[in-house]
Amino acid sequence: MTLNVKAVVLSFLAAASLSACGGGGSSGSGGGSVPSPPAPPPPPPPPPPPSNMTDVVYATGSVDGGNAEVELLLDVYQSGEVCSEPRPFVIMIHGGGFNGGTKQHWADDGAALADRDFVGVGIDYRLFGDDPEPGPEIDPLFQLLLSLVDEDIVLAPDELQLLRTIASSVEDAGNAVEWVQENSEELCVDPDTFALWGSSAGAYISLLLGYALDDAGLTPIGQSVVIDHWGAQLVPGAMQTGDSPLFILHGDQDGSYPEALALQADADLNQIPYSFYTVEGAGHGPDEVGLKTNGVDGVTFYDLTLNFIEAHLRDGTPLYETRTIPAPGSSNVQNFNGSVTGKLSAAELEPLFSNAQRVSGVNAGRAEIVSWPEAFQGQALAISLDALAVGERYSGAHWITSLPARDELYLSYRIRFEPGFDFGAGGTLTGLAGGNPDSLANGVDWWAAPVVWRPGGDVAQRLYHPAQMSQTGDVLPWDHGDSG
């Protein structure tokens, strides 16, 4: 009989195959159970919250007329919370006339932004003293700035250097934005949602970076909102329909206020939404306008700024308005937080209330700076009174501070009487007056409207005017008043 080797081999292979498969799917009595798959590994722990960063090199820039390079630094302010989703960021650009200033100016503001769950980024940039040379990428903006100079004017070397400085600073701010975007994952930022916030020279930079790049043939940077604190736009008519909203805060006695009005007109022309706050009688800078002490409707300009940023970076409901507000007088809007606690002398009163006149009771130790948690930033001015002592020479403390002329002026303050205070025969609180402060009411040019407390603590208004010159004046009781 002839053996078919091929058939046998195939048959053997088929049997082996069936055996390897468990005989067609049936398990023998000696078969074991199939082991359970291993448990999946535990999920990795969440990454730690992104932390603050200081003196990070974000770019280099040409200085010394193009003969050297300098590292450019920034600081990053984080909330300390785990990164659950990318956060909007704010580029903060300091002032200083293009000749000074530092990113450290923004430390408190960076913390305030972080408290609202933004990422704050304060930057340094090249200054006039660095003799910077703008790079080729920003040169079109430098050429645009040159073209705006009247052709009949020959720029002096320092004027030309200033234009190079301005162009270089815009280049640096743009590089800072790019650095944040390139490191967005590490920083927990949304690379496409950010604000430019500048003060003084920093506002000039913010406005050029935010609105004028396309005028120079460059790609717009794509910010969501621009904050202009007492700055100006150097490229007239730079705005275009569809540009980002704008916040303007400016004193009308600031030399660059006409440029602020031109910026407003440009925004109106291009239907760009904005808020514009003019501080009447104020010059240049945060103290002049009262950034953290002055404001509208009980909201400081500082909080209005933060609210404006938040509304645009988080799809809120922005407030767009144009308001004119009196400048803060040092006597009726006051922050004592920077003062050393303790009794005041008449000389120490001057920095707090400039041009104080008819000062009494201060050198007697009856005025002092004290800690009071309920007061603005934790400190207050305390006045000591002797029970039943009458007259400014014998009790309390008294002074008059001149304010600029106003058609309207509002005074508000908080006062607390110590527990057990003896209201005695009454007393006088801070109030407003007009006319010559060196004389009493004379029937012609002097009036006063101090607030007074009466026996028992009731509050009233005392009014002196040309028709009422008696020692007590007209006393007008308030509807409500207590000793609290």
Image (tube, grey):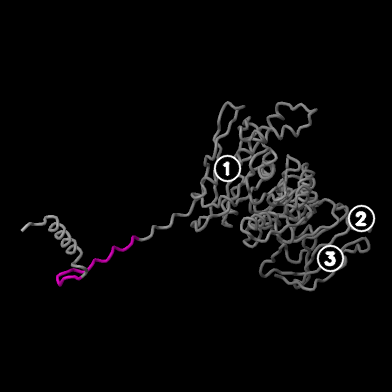
Q: Say which label, 1 or 2, has the lower sequence index.
A: 1
Circle 3 crowding by C-alpha within 10 Å: few under 14, some 14–19, many from 20: some
Q: Answer left or right for 295 relative to 7.
A: right
Name the residue beneath numbered marker 1.
Answer: 176
Where in the figure is residue 446, as x and y percent of width and height?
A: 89, 57
Name the residue beneath numbered marker 3.
Answer: 462
On screen, 207 above or below 188?
above
Secondary structure found at label 2? loop
Circle 2 crowding by C-alpha within 10 Å: few under 14, some 14–19, many from 20: some
- Between residues 250 and 472, which one lies in front from this camera angle? 250
The N terminus: image quadrant? bottom left
On screen, 461 above or below 54?
below
Q: State the CA–CA distance, disc 1 to disc 2.
A: 58 Å
Secondary structure found at label 3? strand
Q: State the CA–CA distance, disc 1 to disc 3.
A: 58 Å
Q: Amino acid at mark 2?
A: Asp
- Between residues 180 and 63, which one lies in front from this camera angle? 180
Q: Amino acid at mark 1?
A: Ala
Span colored in magenta: 26-41
Name the residue beneath numbered marker 2.
Answer: 445
Secondary structure found at label 1? helix
Q: Amino acid at mark 3?
A: Arg
